[in-house]
């Protein structure tokens, strides 16, 4: 007979082990991530055959954002529950510097603008990349030990998840940062449509303001991430380097292209550069 430690855990033992997890906010945080992944997959699949503005893809887009917002609210609740609301508001630079607050704000922006002006193409991807790694790490730490599997299978899956996290976690952060930076492309097209093509003259003022609000929100988010995340900064700098290499590597590229790019960079440095994450001040705690 095999040793007792090699016997699979029974379904009853799994339920017993699951009960304490059901009482923790981390379990619902995990469910939020898992649900966000599921709804994002559905949204992507239906978007292949229908417009993103069609009811079905839009429904799953919103469901996914709802789950994402839910997970960040849990994290922020756990992080700041010991602090009074008024104290937090007085320390707003600390809140704005918090990565979770920044991503929650972006998710709320996408959710509020999902119906009008519409879904942000690729807007779910950075959140889902984070969700995948959070989910598998939770499975490894909390669900795998109570699953009705023998010890060898548990060790196999535990080692597999550890290998994935160890080998691909940092790469995933680069990919997530890249998907965030790519959002700027949508901002550029929106601004070109509004101003260079005089779209604001043909649309109602409310639509123009909403498009501008979404664009400004994305720009602020990317600037905050550029200041705080080495991954975002590395990707933006690499894009700048590649563009310069293309513009200056060939004598056949018109000089006007280089001039236009330098004007754009100067505009970004002048008007977007000053947008910074507030500096956290030392606040004296009451004894």
Image (cartoon, helix red, strand yellow):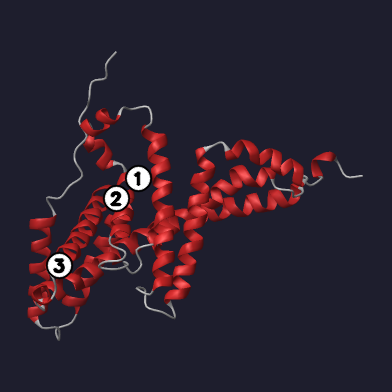
In the foreground, 192 or 28: 28
Answer yes or no: do the residues labelled 1 and 2 have beta carbons within 8 Å? no
Which residue is denoted by mark 3 in the rendering? 208
Judged from the image, the secondary structure of the residue bearing numbered disc 1 is: helix
Residue at point 26% right, 66% down? Answer: 116
Quadrant of residue 241 in the image? bottom left
Quadrant of residue 145 in the image? top right
Horizontally, residue 65 falls left or right of residue 287, namely: right
- Dot placed on the residue nearer the N-terminal end, 3 or 1: 1
Percent across and percent down for residue 133 are: 50, 53
Q: Is residue 171 visible?
A: no
Percent across and percent down for residue 123 are: 34, 63
- Dot placed on the residue nearer the N-terminal end, 3 or 2: 2
Q: Is residue 62 visible?
A: yes
Which residue is denoted by mark 2 in the rendering? 105
Q: Residues within 10 Å of mark 2 (few under 14, many from 20)?
A: some
Judged from the image, the secondary structure of the residue bearing numbered disc 3 is: helix
**CA separation in Å, label 1 and label 2:** 8 Å
Count numbered badges in the picture: 3
Judged from the image, the secondary structure of the residue bearing numbered disc 2 is: helix
Horizontally, residue 81 falls left or right of residue 207, namely: right
Percent across and percent down for residue 135 are: 53, 51
Tell me if residue 19 comes above or below residue 283 in the rendering.
below
* Disc assigned to residue 49: none
Question: Quadrant where the C terminus lies?
Answer: top left
- Dot placed on the residue nearer the N-terminal end, 1 or 2: 1
Q: Residue furthest bottom?
A: 252
Mark toward the viewer: 3 or 1: 3
């Amino acid at each position: 007979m095999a040793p007792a430690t090699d016997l699979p855990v029974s379904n009853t033992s799994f339920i017993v082990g699951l009960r304490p997890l059901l009482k923790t906010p981390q379990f619902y945080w995990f469910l939020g991530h898992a649900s966000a992944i599921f709804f994002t997959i559905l949204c992507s699949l239906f978007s292949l055959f229908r417009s993103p503005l069609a009811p079905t893809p839009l429904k799953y887009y919103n469901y996914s954002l709802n789950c994402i917002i839910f997970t960040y609210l849990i994290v922020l609740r756990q992080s700041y529950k010991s602090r009074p609301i008024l104290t937090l508001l007085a320390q707003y630079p600390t809140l704005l510097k918090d990565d979770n607050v920044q991503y929650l704000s972006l998710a709320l922006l996408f959710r509020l603008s999902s119906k009008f002006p519409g879904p942000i193409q690729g807007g779910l991807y950075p959140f889902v990349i984070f969700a995948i790694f959070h989910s598998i790490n939770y499975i490894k730490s909390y669900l795998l030990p109570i699953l009705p599997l023998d010890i060898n299978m548990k060790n196999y899956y535990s080692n597999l998840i550890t290998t994935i996290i160890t080998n691909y976690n940092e790469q995933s952060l680069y990919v997530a940062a890249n998907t965030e930076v790519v959002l700027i492309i949508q901002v550029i097209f929106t601004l070109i449509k509004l101003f260079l093509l005089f779209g604001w003259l043909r649309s109602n003022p409310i639509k123009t303001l909403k498009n501008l609000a979404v664009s400004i929100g994305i720009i602020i988010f990317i600037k905050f991430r550029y200041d705080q995340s080495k991954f975002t900064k590395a990707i933006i700098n690499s894009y700048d380097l590649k563009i310069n290499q293309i513009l200056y590597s060939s004598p056949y590229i018109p000089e006007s292209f280089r001039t236009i790019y330098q004007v754009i960079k100067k505009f970004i440095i002048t008007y977007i550069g000053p947008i910074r994450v507030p500096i956290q001040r030392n606040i004296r705690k009451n004894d």
